[in-house]
Image (cartoon, rainbow, N blue to C red):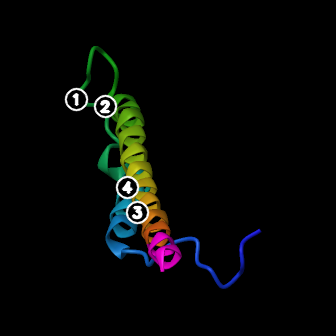
Amino acid sequence: MSSPDVPTRGPARSGPYVIAGVLLAISILVPLFVPAYASDNPRLAGIPFFYWYQMLWVPITAALVGISYRLVTKEDRRRREAVRGVRTEEQDR
């Protein structure tokens, strides 16, 4: 059982979290701006622009969520390793 005084993660860098937040905001907000793509033309293989534009955002959103996940996971791993490094130095003394 760990002591409540011992941290489990090191200090966070805000960069990866900000980038992940921006990527997630893009994937949510851009498709919500319907007037930008509420038209019939141009058609792609007979499919109106309104539909194929929305379907285009499915893989784009999946990619943006995946990138965000990797950024946050990598930062969390770095923070955990920072604490482990401190603990091993303290144990060596």
What amino acid does circle 1 point to?
Pro
Residue at image mark 1: 42
Q: Residues within 10 Å of mark 4 (few under 14, many from 20)?
A: some
What distance separates the C-alpha of mark 4 from that of mark 2? 33 Å
Work out how far the residue at label 1 is from the one at label 2, CA to CA, in angstroms. 6 Å
Disc number placed over residue 27 in the picture, else none: none
Give the spatial CA distance, label 3 vs label 1.
46 Å
Q: Secondary structure at mark 3?
A: helix
Q: Are marks 1 and 2 in contact (CB under 8 Å)?
A: yes
- Outermost residue toward the top? 45
Q: CA distance from mark 4 to mark 3?
A: 11 Å
Relative vertical location of residue 56 with respect to residue 30 in this rendering, above or below: above
The answer to which quarter of the image holds residue 73 is bottom left
Q: Nearer the viewer, mark 4 or mark 3?
A: 3
Q: Secondary structure at mark 4?
A: helix
Residue bearing mark 3: 78
Instruction: Name the one closer to the observer, 77 or 89.
Output: 89
* Residue 69 to residue 11: above or below: above
First in sequence: mark 1 vs mark 2:
1
Q: Which residue is mark 4?
A: 71
Location of the N terminus by quadrant is bottom right
Q: Amino acid at mark 4?
A: Leu
Q: Earlier in the sequence, mark 4 or mark 2?
A: 2
Q: Which mark is residue 49?
A: 2
Closer mark to the observer between disc 4 and disc 1: 4
Q: Residue drawn at (35%, 63%), measured in percent from left and top?
A: 22
Q: Residue at x 22, y 29 (%)?
A: 42
Pointer 2 local density, CA inside 10 Å: few below 14, some 14–19, many at least 20: some
Residue type, numbered disc 3: Arg
Q: Is residue 22 left or right of residue 93?
A: left
Residue stretch rendered in magenta on the structure: 86-93
